[in-house]
Amino acid sequence: VYPAWRWCEKLDAIERVQKEKNLRPNLPDFYNMAMERPKKDPRGYCLLFVDASRKSGLGSSFSHSCNPTCEVRVVSLHGKLQLSMTTLRDLEQGEELTFDYNAVTESLDEYRFAVCLCGQRRCRGSFLHYATADCYQQVLSRNSPMAARFANLVRGCTKQVMSREDSAILARHGFNTAAFGAVSFNHHAAATSLVSRDSIDNVPIWLRTYVADCLRYIEYERRALPVALLCNQMERMSKESKAAVAKRKSSSKKSKSESAVSGSSSSKPTKESKPKSSYFYYLEKKRSQFEAATKKKHGSLRGLELAQAVNKEVAKSWAGMSDAKKEVWKKKAVAEWKKGGGSKNKDKGKPSKQEMQRKSKDKSGKESQPLKVTTKAKAKKSESVAPSDAASLKGEKSASK
């Protein structure tokens, strides 16, 4: 059994040696349990660590479970505190005895390596609870930075008498001789003296004052930490939602641009193009459906093999289709081709029937018009010549007379 300060010293020493020898494991050993001395104890509250790697009972070999059958409780037996393993429910014969380790880590690597194999329905996936130190550090840095802690230490050193507020906060948290450890024990006092050898009055005033300031901050942290955790969680969720919205917008823009490009290239036929055949149109429209079915049926196919398998399935479906349905697909292909401007592009550059008739009329009119003009000219010429001939005839008659 170790007090908290001694246990931390031991862990630091082990970690330093493992780092020097390059023997640090991915997960530390979990053969220890924390035992809290109750506040009502005559010596007050204290946190003790039980090292089960040296001396332990059968309970130290129990496995972890997210739905345990047992739990650990602190009990008093013959005037001594002990850790007792008690069951949580009635157990069947042969059922395994397990308990929840309730261990917390601030290392993400340790959390990932601590894979839970309990196999329960609501398994957490890890037998460690992951708690980031960011929130704790933010509250500590904001409300009790290093300068404030040193100021509390200096202020405690200047005090000569304990204040009532400091004594009250120590009593409220149950801090007595057990919490201060060997400092509270006076080795120089005689055993027969009236002064108790184990008393909180033996603890220096500056230390009691500094501990009272730390407890005062802990009380504040209990009130402020949940708010900080909620704020951080809400901020993280808002960032994730904004990132998801931005990702959706970018993906929608990308899909629109791709559809626009594909539509401009495929749905709008080029000049003199023809509509797709009914089979290839059916293949284009049903490819994704047949591809999903083929992947589900043959999950190992990829690339060219998948494309060949899809083409085979489409060909089988097309071969078993009736002529009426094929005609429907043909009409759909022609309708989509016309919708994309195929018929306009096909007829573009060729004159319509009305234009050809108008041009033919214009051509026939231009050819017949000069003939009419020449006949009229001849008629006018004959009319103009006829009077002169008549005059000459009259002159000839008169001359003969």
Image (cartoon, rainbow, N blue to C red):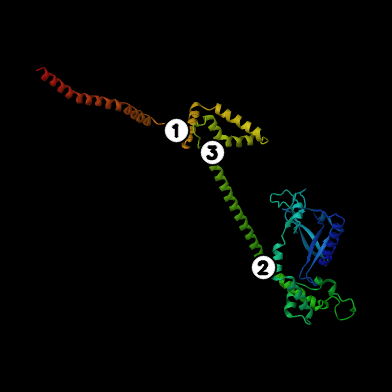
Who comes first in sequence, dot 1 or dot 3? Answer: 3
Pick out the residue farthest to the bottom.
160
Residue tagged by mark 3? 265
Residue drawn at x 83%, y 77% as measured from the top left? 202
Q: Nearer the viewer, mark 3 or mark 2?
A: 3
Who comes first in sequence, dot 2 or dot 1? Answer: 2
Is the residue marked by circle 1 packed among few (<14), some (14-19), or many (20+) residues within 10 Å? few
Amino acid marked by disc 2: Ala
Q: Secondary structure at mark 1?
A: loop
Q: Nearer the viewer, mark 1 or mark 3?
A: 1
Residue tagged by mark 2? 224
Residue drawn at x 77%, y 55% as measured from the top left? 110
Q: Position of residue 82 (x, y in %)?
A: 81, 63
Using the numbered discs, state the Cα–Cα distance from disc 1 to disc 3 in whole angstroms: 21 Å
Q: Secondary structure at mark 3?
A: helix
Residue drawn at x 84%, y 74% as measured from the top left? 183
Using the numbered discs, state the Cα–Cα distance from disc 3 to disc 2 in whole angstroms: 61 Å
Amino acid marked by disc 1: Gly
Pick out the residue farthest to the left.
401
User: Image quadrant of residue 1?
Assistant: bottom right
Who comes first in sequence, dot 3 or dot 2? Answer: 2
Amino acid marked by disc 3: Ser
Q: Position of residue 392 (x, y in %)?
A: 16, 21
Residue tagged by mark 1? 349
